[in-house]
Image: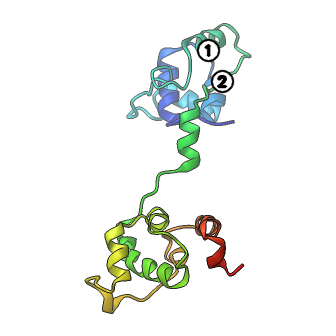
Amino acid sequence: MTRPLMPKATAVWLVENTSLSFDQIADFCGMHTLEIQAIADGDVASHIMGLDPVANGQLKKEEIERCEKDPTARLVLEKHDEVAHLAKKGIKYTPMAKRGDRPNAVAWLLKNHPELSDLQIVKLIRTTRPTIESIRNKTHKDIEDLSPQNPVLLGLCSQMELDKALAVAVKNIPLDEKGE
């Protein structure tokens, strides 16, 4: 079962604002019943501000009321398609330490996989078209210091992402260029 965002803060809010049992809150938040009891006693998480699961769309008020009436009932987390979509796709971020490796990755891709379009390279390693063009034309400011390196080994993309981009690139090559 999926858990709510910030489970401890959610547990604090549920303890303070509902009459749910410790077992119900513990089950919903993925915590132990003793942790919930310690929150209620003020021994744990006294410094944590409660997070309203109704306000952020994780629960409905009716769901809380249903479980308050029946101590054996369990809270059910609301499902959101857009949240699942974001979690599946993920946010691409390149750490500062790896950003300097992008030109090396571009050089490797241009050398080993010329079938990739500039747009595919941009999406794959999150660089810019002018950078790709300057490396291709050998006008990049650090062209003497570039050493082509595999972007997978540099951690700029996964092998699966690279394979997927190559499959699309090969599919888009006209038949006469493939040698068929």
Relative placement, left or right, of 169 versus 1 is left
Residue type marked 2: Val
Q: Residue furthest top?
A: 69
- The one of 130 and 56 positioned closer to us in this rendering: 130
**In which quarter of the view is residue 63 placed?**
top right
Q: Residue at x 66, y 29 (%)?
A: 27
What residue is disc 2 on?
76
Instruction: For mark 1, give the secondary structure.
Output: helix
Relative placement, left or right, of 93 versus 68 is left
- The one of 86 and 95 positioned closer to us in this rendering: 86
What residue is disc 1 on?
63
Residue 35 percent location from the top left of the image: 57, 34
Q: Residue at x 64, y 35 (%)?
A: 32
Q: Is residue 31 visible?
A: no
Quadrant of the rendering where the C terminus is positioned: bottom right
Residue 44 percent location from the top left of the image: 48, 35
- The one of 108 and 24 positioned closer to us in this rendering: 108
- The one of 61 and 28 positioned closer to us in this rendering: 61
Q: Residue furthest left?
A: 141
Image color mode: rainbow
Q: Which of disc 2 and disc 1 is earlier in sequence?
A: 1
